[in-house]
Image (cartoon, grey):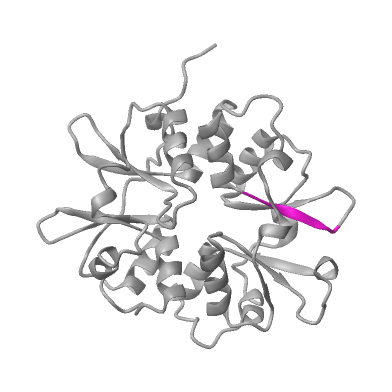
Amino acid sequence: MGSQPDVDAAVNKRGIIVCSGECALTDVADLLIEADHTSVLVVDDSGNRLGVLTENDLMAVCATGADLKSKVKHWLRSGNARLPQDTVQMLTVDKATLLIEAARQMFLQRNSRQACHHLLVKTPAGDINWILSAMDIVKAIASQCTGLGTVARVADVMKTRVVLPECVRSAPLVQAVRTMFEANQNCVMVVDGDCENAEDKRIHDVITPRDFLHALAGRDIACATVADWLRGTIVTSLELRRISPHAMLLDAAKKMASTNMHHLVVIEPGSCEIQGVVSCLDVVCFLGQS
């Protein structure tokens, strides 16, 4: 048996995005989309670390009615940020930390309102050169085929449909974001609005924080409905997200890694019925609690 993988083997080698606390929140959305990242390190004029801003923070800004044009530093001090300055030390790991330990840290704080899918990574000299995301861990698991055992299946870790939030196609996109935030989930199912029986509702698609980030970067959120957004080309179709509840969890990790999709929709083979959703964080937390 080989040695266990560490954070250095998993961390995103593309580097870290850094922005000033004086930047507007909407400017960060542009940065994240352009660089295809999910987080930025925020510093003041002297280079001191103020915290980390994630795509989930931008979703929370919208959901709570905060001003998207306000400065990043004000959000980090608001008490609602996922990784503000006073959590930086707690959520920083050394690059030699075992991957399973990093996963455990994400697992231990997953249910808090400030739960973050990211950890800062420091060098032996104390410099923070990377941010480790849940997707980074999943990609390492997928490439090394390790950590998830040989019996864990998607059905063992997925969120079932009953706990997932819903919105109708005619709802404002901002309402869909608020629904995700209030349910403390990172996806919302888009369903028919004219069906009283929940089990008979047709699920058209799912919307995630990444979809909202694209909309925010395009400044297309004030009047847009969910249906308007689904007509675009950014949202990934259900068919591409599809995975069987009987699939091995490692196979789910490999699909997430190869497609860069953070959420897969769990559908029984030969059926159109959605049973639930499995996310990168679900996979990471399984690793972290094992």
Residue depicted at x 70% and y 39%:
156
Q: For this view, does 19 lie left or right of residue 26? A: left
Residue depicted at x 72% and y 59%:
162
Residue depicted at x 46% and y 36%:
103
**Vertical order, 10 against 275 (above or below):** above
- Residue 274 lies within the magenta run: yes
- Residue 251 lies within the magenta run: no
User: Which residue is at the far front?
Assistant: 112
Judged by its main secondary structure, the magenta piece is strand
Give the position of the C terminus as an image quadrant.
top right
**Where does the image place residue 215, in percent across and percent down from the top left?**
50, 74
Which residues, given as a range, are shown in magenta?
A: 272-278
**Where does the image place residue 163, in percent across and percent down from the top left?**
67, 58
**Where does the image place residue 229, in percent across and percent down from the top left?**
61, 77
* Quarter occupied by residue 54: bottom left
Q: Nearer the viewer, residue 32 or 39?
A: 39
* Quarter occupied by residue 94: top left
**Where does the image place residue 221, in percent across and percent down from the top left?**
50, 81
User: Which residue is at the far top?
Assistant: 1
Q: Nearer the viewer, residue 215 or 134?
A: 134
